[in-house]
């Protein structure tokens, strides 16, 4: 089996899996990181959204063979620092976003990546940008999600 080394939530990891095994399976089944959820497995629902080198990606679509030792994967488990929640996680709680909660880790990771990208460009979040987040919420809490993103963005 090929050996693959990369970083996850700040720690270097090495796994022995075939090159074509998707990163989502490595995270969940090999490393035991269950924040990224399996929804569709074909890069549509975005329940697995995580960050790769600071950008929102869907691990269900990334073969582990594409990762390099310097690549940094961040999952929802890697957002909080110590006992403190990330401002976006806190906004989710403050706005009572979750119903079933299944999509929420992916929603939060997509929101953080968007806010960080827009802030780096020196701009504020717009309604149009919020509309472009394509993570599916089967419970339909989109209004609360958008309100939480705005609140989280204000505290990031």
Image: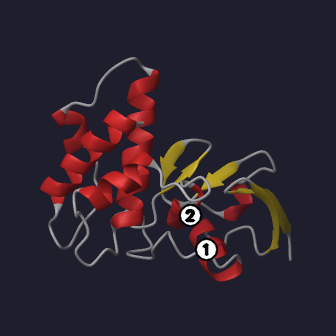
Q: CA distance from mark 1 to mark 2?
A: 8 Å
Please tell me which residue is depicted at 76% across the width and 74% down the height of the picture.
18
Horizontal side of residue 7 vs 99, given as left or right:
right
Position of the N terminus, as image quadrant, is bottom right
Residue located 44% across and 42% down the image: 113
The residue beneath circle 2 is 77
> What's the mark number on residue 33?
1
The image quadrant where one finds the C terminus is top left
Q: Secondary structure at mark 1?
A: loop
Decide if residue 135 is in sight here: no
Question: Closer to the N terminus: mark 1 or mark 2?
Answer: 1
149 vs 43, nearest the viewer:
149
Q: Quadrant of residue 74?
A: bottom right
Which residue reaches farthest front?
Answer: 83
In front: mark 1 or mark 2? Answer: 2
| Residue at the image position 17 percent from the left and 56 percent from the top | 144
In terms of secondary structure, where does tag 2 sit? Answer: helix
Q: Are marks 1 and 2 in contact (CB under 8 Å)?
A: yes
Can residue 125 be seen in this snapshot? Answer: yes
Q: Position of residue 25 (x, y in %)?
A: 60, 76
């Amino acid at each position: 089996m090929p050996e693959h080394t990369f970083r996850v939530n700040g720690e270097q990891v090495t796994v022995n899996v075939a090159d074509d095994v998707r990163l989502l399976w490595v995270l969940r089944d090999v490393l035991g990181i269950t924040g990224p959820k399996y929804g569709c497995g074909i890069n549509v629902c975005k329940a697995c959204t995580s960050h790769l080198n600071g950008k929102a990606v869907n691990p269900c679509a990334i073969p582990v063979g594409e990762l390099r030792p310097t690549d940094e994967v961040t999952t929802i488990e890697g957002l909080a620092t110590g006992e403190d929640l990330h401002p976006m996680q806190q906004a989710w709680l403050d706005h009572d976003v979750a119903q079933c909660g299944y999509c929420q880790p992916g929603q939060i990771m997509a929101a953080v990546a968007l806010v960080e990208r827009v802030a780096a460009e020196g701009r504020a979040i717009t309604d149009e940008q919020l509309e472009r987040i394509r993570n599916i919420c089967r419970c339909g809490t989109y209004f609360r999600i958008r309100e939480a993103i705005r609140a989280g963005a204000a505290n990031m």
